[in-house]
Amino acid sequence: MIDPRILRDDPEAVRAAQRRRGEPTEIVDKLIAADEKRRSSIAAFEAVRGEQNKLGKLIPKAQGDEKAELLTRTKALSAQVKDAEAAQTEAADAFELLMKSLPNLASAEAPEGGEDDFVVLDTVGTPRDFTAEGFEPRDHLELGQMLGAIDTERGAKVSGARFYFLTGIGAQLELALTQLAMSKAAEWGFTPMIPPALVKPSAMEGTGYLGQGSGDDVYYLEKDDLYLVGTSEVALAAFHSDEILAADSLPRRYAAFSPCYRREAGSYGKDTRGIFRVHWFDKVEMFVYTTLEESYAEHERILSWEKAWLDGLELPYRVIDVASGDLGLSAIRKFDCEAWIPSQGRYREVSSASNTTEFQARRLDIRVRGEGGTTPAATLNGTLCAMTRTIVALLENGQQADGSVRLPAALHPFLGEVLRPIA
């Protein structure tokens, strides 16, 4: 949630942020009215409760008719107190529910518009000219089948569409990427983590993954009242829920390896071939707890680590500043790194870095205690390595005319220089 004081002191800033997202501004007026009702209900409750307490002190000293009258008034006040308390609770719940539907305030630095209105911040490397090299590039699925690395037919047989097996060198490639990514993150000061992939509804709601339609994309186990995470960001954000962190312990940086599950609602017919868009994939995710003031610089640092990772994999890529209308519920600004995919002739997202400021921490009650008192923490997240998409990029960009794949030097200690077809 945003700071309610912003809503009271500068509602136009909230309206402007909604317009940047392309979202309706009417919610601001509804929130202001709900907040006024909530505060007036608190005042009404405190007034009758105060009168009740005052009478309670007079009764022991009263006698006769006066005492009887005081008891009668106290009985009537008890009913009023009960009603006022119920009204206060109802108003508070209504305000909180409405506040949770309000997205974080999109940064004025983010470009305005929708999915296609991003701004390219940087382009690194040059895509290969396969025509000049004298052959037509294969896509990752054909290469994966030649290498004995990917089996989508048996994945579909066992689990359905958009599932797969990584086999042989494919499984070894993911394990190598995992080891490399986790060790790189540790070098950068991240604590390695392996978190649960099943979380309570409070963790999903606290991170904003049940709002703004995103709930349609998650897997829910009704019998257990648990969700399968779409990213380990959820578990990492909830890791310190209901806690107060010492200011001198920040930043706290965690890097987690976990499976991720997504229903891919709304993506029917998109990227159905191969393993680019799937229902399950593994990922190494970076997550940071810091202060609001430090979050902006930390956002840039996360992006720099993601770029260093892609540089190490020797992939051509670009960095985009995601448009405000394409941000998730929690982020004020988001950078995506997109690798060049030869078979598609375009850049595609392989990692992202988001600053969610205090939004998730307020919902999860994560605070920081410093010299000036206690304030909400700020949280950020960034994908270091989404395995399937990284494998797609490595196979297609490293392919040779005979179907073999040259690997970047960073992976040579794990797998050697070249992956060769099995037949």
Image (cartoon, rainbow, N blue to C red):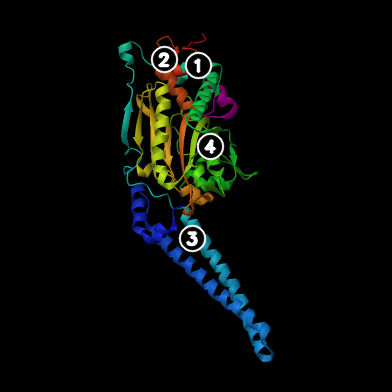
Alpha-carbon span between mark 1 and mark 2: 13 Å
Looking at the image, which is closer to me, 225 or 107?
A: 107
Hey, what amino acid is under mark 2? Gln
Question: x%, y% of residue 361?
Answer: 50, 48
Residue 78 makes an appearance in the image: yes
Hey, what amino acid is under mark 4? Ser
The quadrant in which residue 313 appears is top left
Judged from the image, the secondary structure of the residue bearing numbered disc 4 is loop
Question: x%, y% of residue 194?
Answer: 58, 33
The residue pinned by badge 3 equals 95
Alpha-carbon span between mark 1 and mark 3: 54 Å
Q: Residues within 10 Å of mark 1 (few under 14, many from 20)?
A: some
Which stretch did the figure color magenta? 150-164
* In this picture, residue 161 sits left or right of residue 223: left
The residue pinned by badge 1 equals 145
Looking at the image, which is closer to me, 264 or 286?
A: 286
- Front: mark 4 or 3: 4
- Sequence-earlier tag: 4 or 3: 3
Q: Examine the rendered structure and indicate whether residue 261 appears above or below residue 176.
A: below
- Front: mark 4 or 2: 4
